[in-house]
């Protein structure tokens, strides 16, 4: 819905104090929920973008509908919407859902912002370190070439769809997010029961590199990007990538549990399906947050152990 005159006045007053009206797609997801809470506590006004639009702005990428007037005059958009990568076993249909939910939604959003009279100054658009593919021990930064495979193809198409907004003068940054550590969901929440029972361990050889970030740093870095004039890809990962073997040992140490039982690769592949397990658990991506660290971002949790202790409150 369009803003009322009173809403414009309130927004201008908030802006004078460095506070923002920020539309968030995917606001009910793991990152979106934490981000909404974080921005609210910081004094900003997060506005959810949902299918029914009852408490914010309405949209439905599936049928191409969107409340364009709801975006008029807001300060920024954080675009996090997309079907969960690991929520279901992969088949052709599921992979299409994963791709289309990102590509179609971004296309609809970016083209809408480009047509506004008063577009937001900033679009922070979701992305993933899946861009880099399976790269072994190679050190990867935002300037590294893309890899190969399904997730790389998804990210390339996903990021490309922000072009209309960028051409219209909106500052666009791509949030290439790694493995987000949270006790509330994601990979860590799925691993915790095994490790708490003392039957967790490295996955396969354990040589694959995992690039993680605490949920606290994930949302803090997103807010930091709202206030910094950074464009293009930004790796949202911690500064301390580790192998999966080191991850398992560190998590066991934080929980005070043994990690002597390795998990054979065939187990997760049987449970999840080979392609999904390979992409989620066995792909090696040694990614560094060069753009953020060079621009002065200071991590809340600079090491893996810090991150695990922080999110697990230990």
Image (cartoon, grey):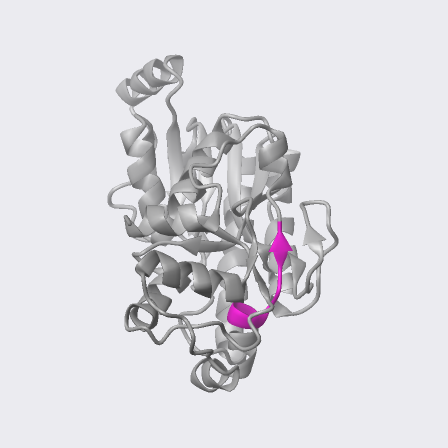
Q: Is residue 243 left or right of residue 188?
A: right
Quadrant of res 57 = top left
Q: Residue at x 47, y 31 (%)?
A: 224
Q: Residue at x 38, y 52 (%)?
A: 308
Does residue 49 belong to the magenta stretch?
A: no
Quadrant of res 49 = top left
Closest to the observer, 203 or 184: 203
Closest to the observer, 2 or 273: 273
Residue 120 lies, in percent from the top left, at 49, 30
Magenta highlight range: 279-287
Q: Is residue 271 left or right of residue 5?
A: right
Q: Residue at x 71, y 57 (%)?
A: 138
Residue 204 lies, in percent from the top left, at 54, 77
* Depicted 189 relative to depicted 75: above or below: below
Does residue 282 belong to the magenta stretch?
A: yes
Residue 176 lies, in percent from the top left, at 56, 49
Task: Point out the residue furthest to the left here.
Answer: 54
Residue 23 seen in render:
yes
Closest to the observer, 68 or 309: 309
Quadrant where the N terminus sits is top left
Residue 160 lies, in percent from the top left, at 65, 50
Q: Residue at x 71, y 62 (%)?
A: 147
Closest to the observer, 219 or 251: 251
Residue 83 seen in render:
no
Number of marks in the rendered image: 0
* Depicted 105 relative to depicted 244: above or below: above
* Depicted 286 relative to depicted 163: above or below: below
* Depicted 290 relative to depicted 61: above or below: above
């Amino acid at each position: 819905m369009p803003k009322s005159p009173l809403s414009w006045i309130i927004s201008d007053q908030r802006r004078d104090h460095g506070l923002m009206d920020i539309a968030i797609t995917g606001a009910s997801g793991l990152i979106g929920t934490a981000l909404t809470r974080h921005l609210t506590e910081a004094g900003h006004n997060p506005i959810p973008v949902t299918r029914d639009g009852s408490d914010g702005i309405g949209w439905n990428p599936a049928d191409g509908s969107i409340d364009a007037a709801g975006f008029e005059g807001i300060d920024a958009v954080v675009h996090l919407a997309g079907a969960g990568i690991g929520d279901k076993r992969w088949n052709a249909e599921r992979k299409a859902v994963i791709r289309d939910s990102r590509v179609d939604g971004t296309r609809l959003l970016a083209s809408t912002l480009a047509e506004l009279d008063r577009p937001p100054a900033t679009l922070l658009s979701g992305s993933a370190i899946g861009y880099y593919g399976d790269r072994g021990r190679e050190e990867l930064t935002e300037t590294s070439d893309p890899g190969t495979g399904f997730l790389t193809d998804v990210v390339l198409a996903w990021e490309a769809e922000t072009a209309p907004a960028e051409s219209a003068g909106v500052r666009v940054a791509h949030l290439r997010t790694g493995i987000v550590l949270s006790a509330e969901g994601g990979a860590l929440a799925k691993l915790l029961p095994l490790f708490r029972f003392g039957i967790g361990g490295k996955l396969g050889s354990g040589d694959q590199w995992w690039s993680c970030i605490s949920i606290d740093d994930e949302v803090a870095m997103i807010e930091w990007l709202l206030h910094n004039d950074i464009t293009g890809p930004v790796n949202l990962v911690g500064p301390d990538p580790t192998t999966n073997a080191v991850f398992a040992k560190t998590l066991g140490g934080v929980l005070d549990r043994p990690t002597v039982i390795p998990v054979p690769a065939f187990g997760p592949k049987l449970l999840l399906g080979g392609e999904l397990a390979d992409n989620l658990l066995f792909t090696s991506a040694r990614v560094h947050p060069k753009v953020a660290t060079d621009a002065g971002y200071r991590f809340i949790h600079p090491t893996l152990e810090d991150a695990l202790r922080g999110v697990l409150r230990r």
